Image (tube, grey):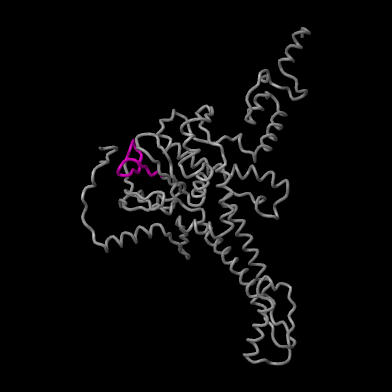
Amino acid sequence: MKIFGINFGKKEEPVQKKSIKDDIEQAKQAEAVNQGVIIFGESLDHRISPQKSYLLYEKVSIIFDAVDKVASKGADLSLVIKDKDRNVVRDSEILNLLNKPNSMKTKTSFWNEVLTSFTLTNEAWFVARGNVKYPPLAIDFIEPYDVIEISKSSNEPMPMTIKTQSDKDRRTYYRELIDGEYRFFSKDGLNELIPVIGKNYSNSWRGMSKLSPLIEEVIHIKEGNKHNRALLENGMNASIIIAPDNDEIDEDETDDLRKQIKAKHQGSGNAGNVLMLPMSFKLVDKSASNRDMDYMQLIDTDESRVFRLFNIPLPLVKSTNMTQSNYEVAVPALYSDAVLPIFNQVAEEITAKILRRYKLKKGEYLTFDEFNIPALNNYQVKLMNELIKTNSVTINEVRSRGGLEKVDGADDVMISANMIRLQDEKNLYSETGE
């Protein structure tokens, strides 16, 4: 059987036999593609592989917090289909699949994984199960670090062959040009690998991690955590120097004294202990305090840079900015600047690459229900109150801004001076003959 130019169901054509050495070398090259390169120096080529992006996400709390704020809230959005006139469809075969993509994942957990991946790496990978000529029966998400390019033409960045090495999918996918667009199918024609790629690295078709311009800041934060842990374990700022005031002590006595200080001050359980020394000492150097304060200020600045890069409003995460007024303004900004743009990018690609198999009507697309976001309810009510104070507005126009249905008798324009209906004003003039 031949579908889309691929002979499905037949044995693959014989290829030239390779040695074990060739296989090992190819595996090394494939692995190298996925490891990423970080080069410090004049080139400033800070490239972060998907694997390293996820590692930093798991080990640096600031990265985890920023990404989770976007992904978790995006995963809670209610999915709908809209047409070019913005009419809403809430119940369809498409939405049933996207709300329950497979037997192992709920809608929230599935979309959390997808949006985490795209926020971190500018990549999300799907495998659509079922005959590639018909609507998919299920969808699996594949982490970007489990997707490896196998073969590539020398004159184009997109590979000819891609392999997945996830527990959810271990297959080889082959590129085909269908209706002017490249797609990746398994040999049996029962699986399609679908890439969703955002901003690219230069000279590459893979996604550019948002952590790439943050490499220095992330390293500062990691080293800052080590610095603080060392202070806790050692019990004293290492840059503070003390010396005997009068008597000299030998090397053995110095070691005993050092052990005594550590025994009394090392670890959180010794905080506040009083240390009695056998002789008087003088303070030689305490200049470390300023350096420590400078370093902590650096860490604070780097954390702010991380949140700003992910478009997280600082009043949501920094106590110095967390006033009631700032917080109320920051919640809508989190959605408008961070959550919704990420979701819309993924939804647009899903519309083009997955929903095409459902033969959507022209102009239909996947999006979210903007009126079913609890965190924005107060914001929408405030906008409705502001709108009703303006000139030439109807009650139904106000209701539509809050996602409410139209009601009878609410299409007359309101006059802002006394808020009576324009129709009543006309009737008054008619009765008086004026």
Residue 156 seen in this snapshot? no
Main SS of residues in magenta: strand
* Of residues 202 and 169, the one drawn nearer to the viewer in this rendering: 169
| Closer to the camera in the image, 39 or 7 | 7
User: How many numbered discs, if any?
Assistant: 0
Which x, y percent locates residue 424? 74, 15
Residue 238 appears anywhere in the view = yes
Q: In the depicted view, which residue is nearer to us: 23 or 152? A: 23
The answer to which quarter of the image holds residue 247 is bottom right
| x, y percent for residue 430 | 74, 9
Q: Quadrant of the N terminus?
A: top left
Q: Is residue 183 magenta?
A: yes
Residue 207 percent location from the top left of the image: 45, 50
Q: Residue at x 28, y 37 (%)?
A: 3
- Quadrant housing residue 137: top left
Q: Give the answer, above or below, for where 283 lies relative to 211.
A: below
In the image, the segment drawn in magenta is 177-194
Q: Quadrant of the C terminus?
A: top right
- Relative to 164, say whether 408 is above or below: above
Q: Residue furthest front?
A: 103
Residue occupying image coordinates x 56% and y 55% = 64
Q: Residue at x 68, y 44 (%)?
A: 329
Rendered residue at 30%/51% (across/down) = 153
**341 relative position to 360: left or right:** right
Q: Is residue 401 left or right of residue 420?
A: left
- List x then y, in percent, for residue 363: 46, 29
Residue 428 part of the magenta-drawn span: no
User: Residue 66 versus residue 290: which sits nearer the camera?
Assistant: 66
